[in-house]
Amino acid sequence: MVESDIKYGEKTIGGLIIKGSKILSDAGIENAKAEARLMMAEYTQKDMASLYAGLKDVLDDFTAMRYMKSIKKRAKHYPFQYIIGYTYFMDYKFICREKVLIPRFDTENLVLHALELSPGKDIRVLDMCTGSGCIGISYNLIRNKEGYNDEIYLTDISDDALRLAEDNRKKLRADVKVLKSDLFEAFEPLAAENGEIPENDRFDLIISNPPYIRTKAINNLIKDVRDFEPRLALDGSMDGLDFYRRIIKDARRFLKEDGRLAFEIGSDQYMAVSDLMKKEGFKHIKKLKDMSGLDRVVSGVL
């Protein structure tokens, strides 16, 4: 039996969840009931078992007001993760905030592939366009559990992203360094007079989920993403490939011999990105599909 099968007073937890679910459902929110329950759990600081046990409990006016205010905000398609302030990625709880891209389940494929590419020794890793830090931090935490002590850098050009990545680093106690950088810019001072990067300062693995949505396609994204998530983290130029071109071209200087480069890609971008990699000398190009069977990750060896 669910809360909608029972009559509750308007100020009870159950009654407010029913009201919130209807508002969200009428607004076209796909997971209206689940989100209404999760928001209530967040505002009452209850786990789901306690929440269901207390559906007849009357909520105080202040908490009820905050809950309904958030429901109405979500009804305008303001992202759920921004409202509750977190999301889960690779089973780790990451802080979410406005102006920074929300971690997606599909991006876990990039972390899993990066782990497969990693050798059985400590290595140097760069997570470029890090956003919330979810990729590099998850990678670090999992590798640490396996006994490795990698040197990992998280970079982004957005100050909002860097602040959030640093907060997530501290919260999850990840051993990573967060740096502001326009792609490889922060590492250019390592170059010798001839422009070469010393071998010891190069990376064994570069991973990135760069902006890859075509500029004209952004207006076709769902309202939650189009209107509220940062365009800076979405817009990959007219053909969606601008960041891939720039990263792949310069990666040759910053990767060690036999170094790996791995990207998240749009579902129709494998051929274009793999061709760019081949032209710059990358071999053993691989692609991975996501749970929906769509191309999601591409990697290669220098």
Image (cartoon, rainbow, N blue to C red):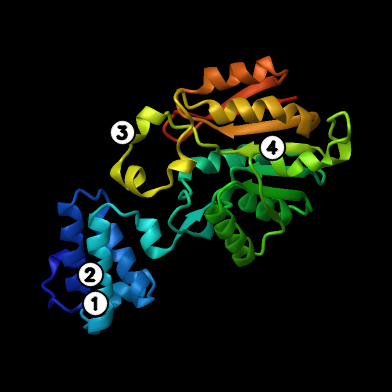
Q: CA distance from mark 2 to mark 4?
A: 44 Å
Disc 2 to disc 1: CB gap under 8 Å: yes
Q: Say which residue appears at 81% left-offset and 37% top-offset.
A: 202
Q: Which residue is mark 4?
A: 206
Q: Residues within 10 Å of mark 3 (few under 14, many from 20)?
A: few
Q: How dense is the environment of label 1, judged by Cα within 10 Å: few (below 14), some, or many (20 and up)? A: some
Locate the C terminus and report the quarter of the image it occupies.
Answer: top right
Residue under label 3, please give it.
220
Q: Label 4's element?
A: strand
- Hey, what amino acid is under mark 4? Ile
Q: Given the image, on which type of amino acid does mark 2 rest?
A: Met
Q: Which residue is mark 2?
A: 68
Chain-order first, disc 3 or disc 4: 4
Compared across the picture, whether 188 is left or right of 85 comes to right
Q: How far is disc 3 from disc 2 in space, using C-alphas? A: 29 Å
Residue 74 at x, y percent in the picture: 27, 58
Q: Categorize mark 2 by other alpha carbons within 10 Å: few (<14), some (14-19), many (20+).
A: some
Image spot of residue 6 (x, y percent): 13, 70
What residue appears at the point 25 percent right and 63 percent down from the top-left corner? 71
